[in-house]
Image (tube, rainbow, N blue to C red):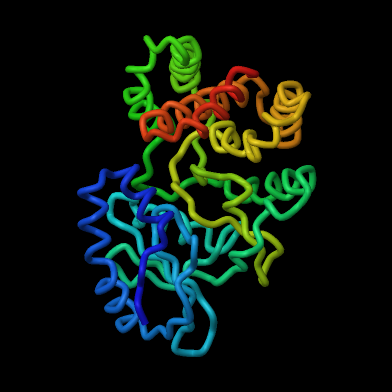
Amino acid sequence: MGFEPPQRLVRTLGETYGDAVAAEWLGKLPELARSTVEHASLDVERVMAPGGRSSLVVLVRRADGSSAALKIAPAAARPDLERDALAHWNGWGAARLLDAPGDGSLVLERLHPEVSLRSLPEAKALLEAAGTVRKLWVEPPAAHGFASVAERTARQATAMEPYRGDAEVGALTAAALEVREELASGSPETLLLHGNFRQGKVLAGDRAPWLAVGPEPLVGERAYDLARLVRDRVEDLVAASAGASAARRRVNRLADSLELDRDRLRGWTLFRAVESGTRALTAGRRQDAELLIEFAGWL
């Protein structure tokens, strides 16, 4: 069968790594997918669409007939780090790694991609999300290659600097950069983090009700990892008449439920929202940027 990449993957790779890099990898993808399937003795069912934002996801069956998911990502997306994190968790709170054929390919436990926490009412989704992410916060393996929160956010802060003087988002950008500097200079813990945790990254499973997928692992404090979850369903928050107070209550409720410092969670939520907002502006996604900037202004 063909391995046509979904449009979301094409668009996101171009935005993240540049059109030239994306086009080069996408040109190699069909043959890479075919060789991986053959090498790992997999039978293909179908390509997932819209699928992942930085990887091709293919539903497959292994040689023993068991179901699985094949994930193929470019080297720039660091699938080696995802492999190492999943191997360390070994199925505890996350999809189990079944095989790593190489060339950015991972064979994973098949979950139910059509059922994420976003299918649940908001309160229930946040409760289940908190229970799932709590399991992932463990001591990292010895001699790991994961970046720290300080290292990752330093690179992001550099990309945000041009927006300091922007008439529309300059004040929020300056505030976000200032709070990032303060938080990164004194992390209270160094745990293995998912790195991109949100409701859409938690899927229904058979072995466990809910399991995390798609980590962008790093090490640092839990408040950073929880910050992306705070703004889930941001479009609903912005549309609500009491969105600002609801957002602040969500920060406090999540911090208290997971025994985190409210101010540190609020600070990382501000930084991550503004970072995503300025990145959306750079990519020309004006509507996304406006939602994120409005949300950040409430914090």
* Pick the front one: 196 or 295: 295
Q: Residue at x 35, y 59 (%)?
A: 73
Residue name at image x 37 percent, y 52 percent: 81
Q: Is residue 233 left or right of residue 76?
A: right
* Residue furthest to the bottom: 64
The relative height of residue 135 versus residue 251 in the rendered view (above or below) is below
Q: Position of residue 190 (x, y in %)?
A: 49, 35
Q: For the point 70% across and 36% down, which residue is it?
A: 236
The total number of labels drawn is 0
Residue 84 seen in render: no
Identify the residue shown where x is 48% and y is 72%.
69
Quadrant in the rendering for residue 228: top right
> Height in image: 256 above or below 56?
above
- Tell me: 256 left or right of 203: right
Image coordinates for residue 44, horizontal then vertical, percent? 43, 82
Please provide percent x and percent y for residue 157.
37, 23
In the displayed structure image, the side of residue 236 where residue 161 appears, left or right: left
Query: Residue 27 sits in which quadrant?
Result: bottom left
At which x and y percent is residue 77?
Answer: 34, 51
Q: Is residue 6 visible?
A: yes
Quarter that holds the C terminus: top right
Quadrant of the drawing holding the N terminus? bottom left
